[in-house]
Amino acid sequence: MATLSSFQGHKIAIVGDSGVGKSTIFALLTGERFSSYYVKTKERAIATKLVSLPNGTQEKLQLWDTPGADETRTYTSHSIRDVKGVILVFDVSNEDTYLNVNNWIEVINTYSNEDSVPIIVIANKIDKVRNRKVKEEQVQQLGIQKGLLFLETSAKSGLNIEQIAPLMAQELQKRSTINTLESDTLSRMNNTPPKDRSIFSSCNLL
């Protein structure tokens, strides 16, 4: 079994439409500063982040920034393969990016090799108060309907950005614990010897 230092990390893809702030969030998560200058991502970028959790454990995340443009979706579909989690970003000032969240969920389900991967929906750019098109209630409703985690963030101010990685790490840890318990329970059930029914077969009616 690989040690934490040699383990490359849980593969986490950051996906969403172009211009929603994926690369800025990626940069902030990996220790870079916010830049208001937008550059379209044409290829993926990868970085590792070690996350310390309140229970004293650590999880290593391998973050993949992906392009959102249709012409570069090949990179995105490749990046989604073998993911252990997805950070799905949309822009609250652009309703189309919110409506495309369902399309992105389909892409994730199509290309990921896992039965179900944790998805955190990031409602980004909430600093654009006057231009906001997607209400907080809509974000909450989406999360509840789809069974997704969600956060409202501002990559510009940094609001809630620092919560993304710990939230994902905790969800991965929780699912790992559940899977281990289910596996142990199934193993014990399979190893339980059948009950001795000979007492019933030897009974005679008087």
Image (cartoon, rainbow, N blue to C red):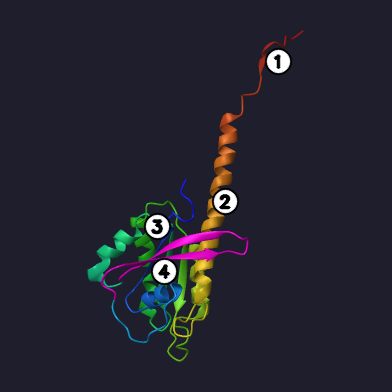
- Where is residue 199, by image quadrant? top right
Mark 3 vs mark 1: give the one in front: 3
Residue with the mark numbered 3: 83
**Which residue occupies the extreme left position in the image?**
71
Q: Residue furthest bottom?
A: 130
Residue 168 drawn at (x, y percent): 50, 64
What residue sits 26% from the left and 72% below the top? 42
Q: Which quarter shows the C terminus?
A: top right
Q: Is residue 65 above or below residue 132?
A: above
Does dot 2 land on a helix, a strand or a loop?
Answer: helix
Counting other residues with Cα less than 10 Å from the Cα at mark 2, is it few (<14), some (14-19), or many (20 or more)?
Answer: few
The span from disc 3 to disc 4 (Cα, nearest Å) is 13 Å
Q: Give the amino acid type for the residue marked by disc 1 in the picture.
A: Ile
* Residue identified by numbered label 2: 177
> 191 or 108: nearer the eye?
191
Q: Nearer the viewer, residue 68 or 26?
A: 26
Q: Residue furthest right?
A: 206
Q: Position of residue 66 (x, y in %)?
A: 33, 68
Q: Earlier in the sequence, mark 2 or mark 1?
A: 2
Q: Report the residue at 56% width, 35% height from top.
A: 187
Q: Between label 4 and label 1, give the one nearer the viewer.
A: 4
Q: Are marks 2 and 1 in contact (CB under 8 Å)?
A: no
Residue of label 4? 88
Instruction: Work out whether 191 lies above or below 136.
Output: above
Instruction: Compare marks 4 and 1 and give the one earlier in the sequence.
Output: 4
Query: What residue did someone put label 1 on?
Result: 199
How far apart, in angstroms, are the residues tagged by discs 3 and 1? 53 Å
- Amino acid on which disc 4 is placed: Leu
For marks 3 and 2, give the CA distance.
18 Å
Position of residue 6 measured from the top left corner of the image (x, y, whole percent): 44, 54
Magenta-drawn segment: 41-67
